[in-house]
Image: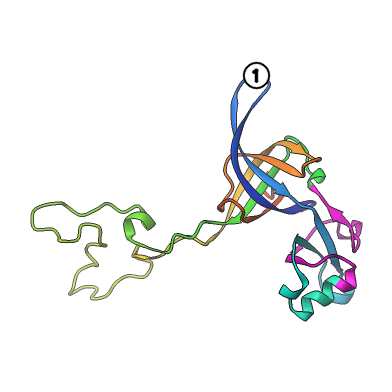
């Protein structure tokens, strides 16, 4: 991986291509991200670049995190994240990474946390069918249904689709295309949808399987 950035999902819209085709895009406010630490094999056992994103007030951070920012000479931020770049040596502490590292037509992977939906039933969570509305079924028609035979296997198999917590999962959508880069506003327009609700933090990185 040669380039990646953190950003905030602003929402979705559409743009028109040169031939008049409508392209649905996700608007992402990408960066700026400040480099606060460059890890090396000699000091840390591996190579990585630690970047900070999202300004934060000092009193909302603990002393270890404040120490990291003061040592790097960077304003306190809300999020710290490591990127294992191939060209780690090209980065230095205090360097700012913005959306200008990407260009139109680049293939990227979008990583985000899906919207949380709380405790849900099997129909919403797993797209199960409801039970029959007549012939003695009920009074609940949206429940799981049969759990298996009583005699054999006399238990519920693992991984059976059941009600439970739905959402709040880390999801990666691969091989999305960057339609436009607005360096002045610090905005990326990515073709298609990106996981997460509006205002959530997403990671845009160079496509691994392009």
190 sits to left or right of 67: left
141 sits to left or right of 135: right
Residue at horizontal 77%, vertical 42%?
A: 185
Colouring used for the render: rainbow
Question: Where 34 falls versus 61 (above or below)?
Answer: above
149 sits to left or right of 114: left
User: Quarter holding the C terminus?
Assistant: top right
Indicate the quadrant where residue 68 lies.
Answer: bottom right
Indicate the quadrant where residue 106 lies.
Answer: top right
152 sits to left or right of 106: left
Q: Which residues make up the magenta segment?
A: 70-98
Q: Position of residue 129 (x, y in %)?
A: 27, 51
Residue at horizontal 88%, vertical 76%?
A: 43
Q: Position of residue 203 (x, y in %)?
A: 68, 54
Q: Assess whether residue 75 is covered by the magenta stretch.
A: yes
Question: Front-most of 43 and 124?
Answer: 124
Residue at horizontal 26%, vertical 62%?
A: 144
Q: Assess whether residue 173 is covered by the magenta stretch.
A: no
The residue that mark 1 highlights is 19
């Amino acid at each position: 991986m040669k380039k990646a950035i953190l950003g905030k999902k602003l929402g979705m819209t559409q743009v028109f291509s040169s031939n008049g085709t409508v392209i649905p895009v996700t608007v992402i406010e990408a960066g700026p991200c400040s480099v606060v630490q460059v890890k090396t094999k000699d000091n840390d056992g591996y190579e990585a670049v630690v970047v900070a994103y999202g300004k934060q007030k000092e009193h909302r951070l603990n002393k270890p995190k404040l120490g990291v920012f003061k040592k790097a000479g960077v304003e306190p931020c809300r999020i710290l994240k490591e990127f294992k770049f191939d060209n780690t040596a090209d980065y230095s502490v205090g360097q700012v990474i913005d959306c200008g590292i990407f260009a139109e037509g680049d293939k990227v992977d979008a990583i985000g946390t899906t919207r949380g939906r709380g405790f849900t039933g099997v129909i919403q969570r797993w797209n199960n069918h409801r039970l029959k509305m007549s012939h003695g079924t009920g009074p609940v028609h949206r429940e799981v249904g049969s759990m298996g035979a009583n005699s054999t296997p006399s238990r519920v198999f693992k991984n059976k689709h059941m009600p439970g917590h739905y959402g709040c999962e880390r999801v990666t959508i691969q091989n999305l295309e960057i339609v436009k880069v607005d360096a002045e506003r610090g905005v990326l327009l990515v073709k298609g949808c990106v996981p997460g609700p509006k205002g959530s933090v997403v990671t845009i990185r160079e496509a691994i399987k392009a």
